[in-house]
Image (tube, grey):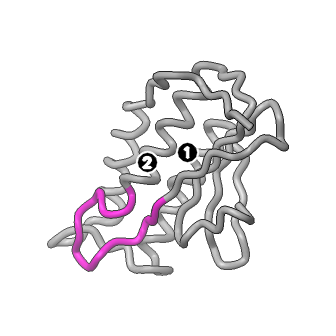
Amino acid sequence: MAVSIPHAVEPDMALAASLFDTLDRTTRHELGVVRDSYGDGEQAAHDLMRAAALRLELEVSIDAIGNLYMTLPGIDRDAPRILMGSHLDSTPHGGNFDGAAGVVAGLAALSGLRARKSSSSARARLGSRGEINSTKA
C-alpha cells in the first residue's frame, strides 16, 4: 500500500531553535549537558518535548517503561505509520544535540505537517527514550 505524504515539508525551525535553547538552559552543567538515562536531566527533556507536542495538539502517550510517543494522526488510522525517533539522554557532559537532535527534528517535521494542514492518509509517530518496536508503535 502506498503512503501519501506531502512533498517538501517545511520543518518548524523556530520550534527547533526554541527547544534546543531550552534544553541547553535546563540540562547544561559546567562542562556540557547532563541528561543521565532515566535521570532528572532526561526527564526534564521529556517534559519539554511532551509540552511542545501538546501545544501542537499531537496525541501524546507514555508506555510502561517511559517511552514517549507523539503522534500526528492521519485521515486513515489503519494506514501504515511513519515512525521516527531518537533518545533524549546524553553522554556525561555531552553536547546539547546528543540524541535530542533526532527528537527535535521529528517535532519540527510534525509541526511543519500540522502547519500545512496535511491531508495525509498516514499517521506520523515520533518516539523517544528507548528503541521503537515498529510492530507495536
* Residue at the spot of label 1: 52
Q: Earlier in the sequence, mark 1 or mark 2?
A: 1
Q: Secondary structure at mark 1?
A: helix
Point out the frontmost of discs 1 and 2: 2
Residue 81: x and y in percent read 69, 46
Q: Quadrant of the C terminus?
A: bottom right
Residue 93: x and y in percent read 22, 75
Mark 2 surroundings: few (<14), some (14-19) or many (≥20) residues within 10 A: many
Q: Secondary structure at mark 2?
A: helix
* Residue at the spot of label 2: 104
Task: Using the rendered view, name the quadrant where residue 94 is placed.
Answer: bottom left
User: Which residue sits at x=54%, y=72%?
Assistant: 130
Kind of residue sitting beneath label 1: Ala
In the figure, 68 relative to 51: above or below?
Answer: below
For the residues labelled 1 and 2, say whether their Cβ atoms are less than 8 Å apart. no
Mark 1 surroundings: few (<14), some (14-19) or many (≥20) residues within 10 A: some
Kind of residue sitting beneath label 2: Val
Q: Which mark is residue 18?
A: none
Residue 100: x and y in percent read 39, 58
Q: Which residues are magenta?
A: 86-100
Q: Main secondary structure of the magenta part?
A: loop
- Measured in 3D between alpha carbons, the distance from the residue under mark 1 to the one under mark 2, in whole angstroms, is 10 Å
User: Which residue sits at x=23%, y=63%?
Assistant: 95
Task: Using the rendered view, name the quadrant where residue 114 is placed.
Answer: top right
